[in-house]
Image (cartoon, rainbow, N blue to C red):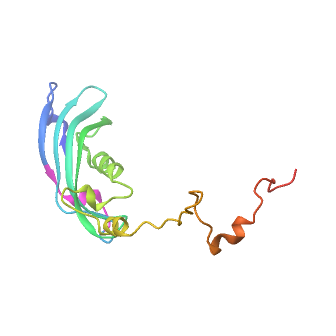
């Protein structure tokens, strides 16, 4: 995303368009990849020290669900983008590294496919469909009845400190 300084007047300019998803440099076999272009709508201005841009960016990403492993399309939208580049001589400023960084930092660490409206995670269905196993309750005192599996634990004396002084 390159901007020529002579195209930006002192009052600023509105730039809107798209860049190919390849600018994100996501690996093809990774957990996330761009399925379309990066859309942007930016207000760009400059002063003696630098070039700044504020606005929005959006891209559709194919992510892998952290629960079930299924791939799904996730629309990532950044509504409060703020970029700034110091002017150091060249008339052509490349905002691609800053755009890439903002999008990569916004990627969810553990994406879930149910975040997309209408999707239901297969793993979540399995968890909610499994019966809840609880200990049987002793009818006499309302406490959980001891099972043979807990016999050794029932004999523990937990009032003594584990580590002597």
Depth check, front residue: 54 or 131? 131
Depth check, front residue: 149 or 106? 149
Q: Give the total number of marks visible in the rendering.
A: 0
In the displayed structure, 134 sits above or below 81; it is below
**Residue 26 spot, x, y in % from top left:** 31, 62
Q: Is residue 35 visible?
A: yes
38 is within the stretch colored magenta: no
Q: Is residue 1 visible?
A: no
In the displayed structure, 1 sits above or below 124; it is above
The quadrant where residue 12 appears: top left
As drawn, is 152 to the left or to the right of 75? Answer: right
**Residue 118 spot, x, y in % from top left:** 18, 59
The quadrant where residue 82 appears: top left
Q: Residue at x 25, y 57 (%)?
A: 23
Depth check, front residue: 99 or 31? 31
25 is within the stretch colored magenta: yes
Magenta residues (range): 18-27
As drawn, is 85 to the left or to the right of 77? Answer: right
Residue at the extreme right: 165
As drawn, is 87 to the left or to the right of 165? Answer: left
Q: Residue at x 29, y 31 (%)?
A: 50
As drawn, is 104 to the left or to the right of 62? Answer: right
In the displayed structure, 72 sits above or below 160; it is below
**Residue 43 spot, x, y in % from top left:** 17, 34
Residue at the extreme bottom: 148
**Residue 107 spot, x, y in % from top left:** 33, 53
């Amino acid at each position: 995303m390159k901007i020529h300084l002579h195209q930006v007047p002192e009052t600023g300019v509105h730039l809107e368009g798209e860049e190919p998803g390849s600018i994100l440099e996501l690996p093809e076999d990774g957990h996330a990849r761009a399925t379309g272009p990066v859309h942007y709508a930016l207000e760009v201005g400059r002063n003696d020290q630098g070039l700044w841009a504020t606005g929005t960016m959006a891209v559709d990403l194919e992510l892998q669900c952290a629960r079930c492993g299924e791939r799904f399309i996730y629309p990532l939208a950044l509504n409060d983008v703020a970029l700034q580049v110091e002017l150091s001589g060249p008339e052509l400023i490349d905002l691609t590294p800053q755009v890439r960084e903002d999008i990569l930092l916004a990627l969810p660490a553990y994406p879930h496919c149910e975040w997309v409206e209408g999707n239901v995670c297969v793993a979540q269905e399995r968890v909610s469909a499994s019966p809840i196993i609880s200990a049987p309750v002793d009818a006499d005192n309302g406490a959980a009845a001891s099972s043979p599996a807990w016999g050794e634990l029932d004999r523990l004396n937990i009032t003594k400190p584990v580590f002597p002084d």
